[in-house]
Image: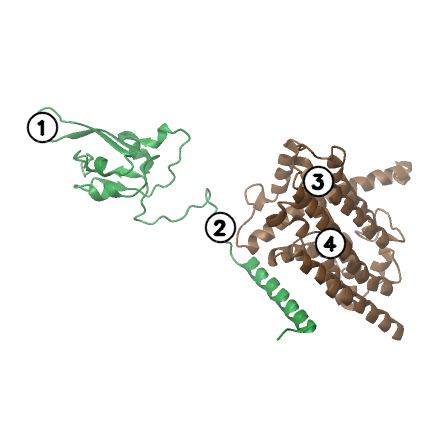
Chain colours: A green, B brown
Amino acid sequence: MKASYFEKVKIGVSTIIKGLLLSFSYLLKKPVTLQYPHEKKVIAERYRGSIRLKRNETGELKCIACGNCERICPASAIKMETFTPEGEKKKKLSEYYVDLGLCIYCGLCVDSCPVDAIEHSIVYEVAEVEKDKLVLRLDTLGEKNA
Amino acid sequence: MAALTGSIFFNIILSIIGVMAVFTINALFAVWLERKVSAHIQLRLGPMEVGFHGAIQSAADGIKLIGKEIITPQGVDKKLFPLAPYLVFFPSLLMFVVIPFSEKLQVQDLNIGLLYFFSISCIATIGIFMAGWASNNKYSLMGAVRSIAQSIAYEIPIILSILGVIIIAQSLKLSDIVARQDIWFLVLQPVAFIIYIIAAIAELNRTPFDIPEAESELVAGFHTEYSGMRFAIFFMAEYTNMFLVAAMATTLFLGGWRGPILPPVVWFFIKTYAIVFLIIWVRWAFPRLRPDQLMNFCWKFLIPLALLNLLVTTFVLKLF
């Protein structure tokens, strides 16, 4: 059945009032905006942020320079240079590169490490003005970890 | 000094400064208010960076717009295109002349103040059409055509609704209308007030009646091709018209500057910005109407209702 003229007017007026009241109720609610540079969101403990190398109790790197992470990295973001010290059999890291411009934060390097020497930090603000600075080295890996 | 204060030149200059001050401060404040209200209705915060809660954001935006290049696109009407913003802008300034901010604070208390106000407000429509035509752009032209159709249609209910007030007040002089409001005319003419607000929102080309500048259909309507300060003039004129419409609603229905304790000017601005808030609130609560719905609403609902209201008003006045 088609609504008559006056029924239509009644529906119209009631919906207008309903709409106004609803939007006013939103006006009084707390905004959901996060004021990003001033406020930061809480990062989950297992968040996959930029990569860092773990150290043992004596402060040495746990890395055994096996190259698993370098090989498994799907984005080829990890490069490492190794050397074998005189009179020793085990290899050691001489340099470790993580290109954050390439890294897809997949976590395969962390999973594949046999000695648990590499991990994700919760650092997510990794943007840089210069492209070169995106490549982390052994010494700068620590800086981004803070 | 005494001779100077009495002279007509001094009065004119003082009036111009006063009107320009109200014009500028209102434009800055109303834009800020609109952004804040719209943001909070949508659970956002709105401008927060420039000044306390973004209080001087509008000023910063103004500076940015002044600094921008004024672009005149190819193929536009070289004479009409730069002229159009001013034709929209100056009626807004002229309309300030009759607004009674308080008993004494009024540029000129014309005895046909109401007629003057609504006649001048029509001139802006020509400016809008000029802008749309001169832009040589189909969206601009569509927006301008729609604006004309809408303005002509909604002039009728707006005038019919204030006729009720005029009949009760027995005057077109705004100071008289305020003086007669021992009871607010809102109480005596509630239907007229509602019709006035609806028709005024349509006259202002604001949502839900913003078909002349419907963003999703016409880019920006008649001011699509305008940029920089020319756009800013359109923009300021829009917010000034909003203030003027609200000021007129205050004068006609809410007892103007009258009120207890606080000074009259403060009362005037409180009431005016309450209406401005209402207009902003409506904008962010409702979607846009289709052009045919808009016309139907005006001709089939608002005008009959306004006529009925007028009839009842005259009848009641004759009887009692």
Residue where numbered disc 4 is placed:
B150
Q: What element carries label 1?
A: loop
Q: In this view, does B152 lie above or below B190?
A: above
The local secondary structure at tag 2 comes to: loop
Q: Is residue B20 left or right of residue B5?
A: left
On the image, the x and y values in percent for residue A40 come to 42, 46
Q: Residue B194 carries which label?
A: none
Residue A58 visible from this viewpoint: yes
Chain designation of label 1: A
Instruction: Write down the residue under mark 2.
Output: A33
Q: Residue at x 75, y 39 (%)?
A: B84
Report how far apart the C-alphas of labels 3 and 1 lie in the structure. Answer: 79 Å
Q: Tell me how far mark 2 sits from mark 3, CA to CA.
A: 32 Å
Work out which quarter of the rendered image holds the C terminus of chain B and state it: bottom right
State which chain disc 2 sits on.
Answer: A
Mark 3 sits on what residue? B233
- Tag 4 subunit: B
Q: Earlier in the sequence, mark 2 or mark 1?
A: 2
Whether residue B140 sits left or right of residue B121 in the image: it is left
Front tag of 3 and 4: 4
The picture quadrant where one finds residue B226 is top right
Give, as a three-letter code, the residue at label 4.
Gln
Task: Name the image quarter holding the N terminus of chain B.
Answer: top right
Which residue, given by chain and number where applicable, does mark 1 sit on? Answer: A88
- In three-dimensional space, the C-alpha distance between marks 3 and 4, rounded to whole angstroms, equals 22 Å
